Amino acid sequence: MSIVTSEPVPRKGIMDIAAYVPGKEHAPGVAKVYKLSSNETPLGPSPAAIEAFKQAAEKLEIYPDGQAVALREAIATAYGLNAANIMCGNGSDELLGLLCHVYLGDGDEAIITEHGFLVYKIQIKGAGATPVEVKEKDCTVDVDAILAAVTDKTKLVFIANPGNPTGTYVPVSEIRRLHAGLPKNVILVLDAAYAEYVRKNDYEAGLELVSSNKNVVMCRTFSKVYGLAALRVGWMYAPAGILDALNRVRGPFNMNSGAIAAGAAAVRDQAFVDKAVEYNLLWQDKLTHAFTALGLKVTPSVTNFLLVHFPDVDGKRAPEADEFLTSRGYILRAVKGYGFPNALRMTIGPEEANRGVIEALGEFMTR
Ligand SMILES: *Cc1c(COP(=O)(O)O)cnc(C)c1O
């Protein structure tokens, strides 16, 4: 017999979850606002993706393809993969949630890292399991710390590679060492949301590890370099056994037809991606140098955002900088919730915004 309560009560743990707070969008009273708080691309999506989305608007009465075949095949072709090992999701957020829903339950543990993406913790708790947070080293995922935290209750290990909000990465040799040290029943989740931006010889998103193991998955997104954040398009490359389990729970029409069509067109336009990456590398370098010259510390980034650390001096700390920049229309991301109370994360924006932030921070540091 269950106990009758005076109102509906959520499952244990749900009310302990701190809801995700998206990046700010508004600066009250400022005419021109640049949103540099959510790692969206300043270049928009490929024109081919916009055209495909418009065409999808002609058939809104028809259910989408529940298998998202056109999108999975386009991704498979672009990345040289087997379409049968790809699952698409309503943003990679949905896929991260499905993994927790299917593989975690009461009493289970999932490992996350000190500065890891907040969505992991939310989904782990949402599944009734316990997030086990391990330290990072120099704002970088620490493989030994993760391996030391594994217990017989561990079911999932989440790492963002590259990391958000750190912008740092772990070389593939370290990811292999991590996987080799995990029990075979533990799934290693490699969240490679920023993989396209990385130009480092010792980086790999994890395709090879997924192909040759039964307990590794890689999540990717169209929200960043592909410029389709509004449509919610994510994908996962995973072994057949894991996909079989997830497919039993996945919403039968989790991808809408506009997202399928636009995603497929976007992934075929790799020339557009190359241009976006080139633009990003240029400004990653320029902004890092400019901020460093102002006396700020920038964590070396391989992504489309920078983690900028402020001096521990009255009037010069991150909250004051945030306020100053917002008053000039530059909206960055406060990252206190990620363990960085004295830093801001800046998404690399359009040229005029990048120049504007350099100028404003110059003023802030000398005022
Ligand atoms: C932006 C981001 C994602 C992408 O999420 P979507 O749901 O696909 O928009 C995933 N992981 C990390 C670490 C991110 O920063």
Image: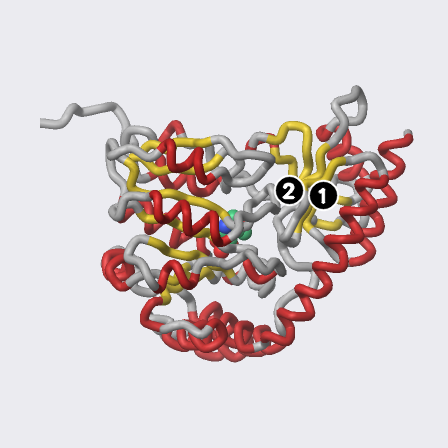
- Amino acid type assigned to the residue bearing label 2 in the image: Lys
> Residue at position x 59%, y 74% from top?
270
In the image, residue 24 above or below residue 173 = above
Q: Nearer the viewer, residue 297 or 95?
A: 297
In the image, residue 57 above or below residue 160 = below
Q: Position of residue 35 (x, y in %)?
A: 70, 49
**Image quadrant containing the N terminus:** top left
Q: How many other residues sit within 10 Å of disc 2, few (<14), some (14-19) or many (≥20)?
A: some
> Residue at position x 85%, y 33% from top?
364
Query: Mark 2: which secondary structure?
Result: loop
> Which badge, 2 or 1, is on the more N-terminal residue?
2
- Amino acid type assigned to the residue bearing label 1 in the image: Ile
Q: Nearer the viewer, residue 235 or 45?
A: 235
Query: Mark 1: which secondary structure?
Result: strand
Q: Which mark is residue 331?
A: 1
In the image, residue 86 above or below residue 180 = below
Residue ranking furthest to the left: 1
Q: Are marks 2 and 1 in contact (CB under 8 Å)?
A: yes
**Image quadrant containing the C terminus:** top right
Q: How many other residues sit within 10 Å of disc 1, few (<14), some (14-19) or many (≥20)?
A: many
Q: Which mark is residue 102?
A: none
Q: Position of residue 59 (x, y in %)?
A: 44, 78
Name the residue that disc number 2 marks.
24
Q: Position of residue 280 (x, y in %)?
A: 70, 59
> Residue at position x 55%, y 34% from top?
137
* 115 left or right, relative to 36: left
Distance Cα–Cα, label 2 vs label 1: 7 Å
Q: Nearer the viewer, residue 289 or 245?
A: 289
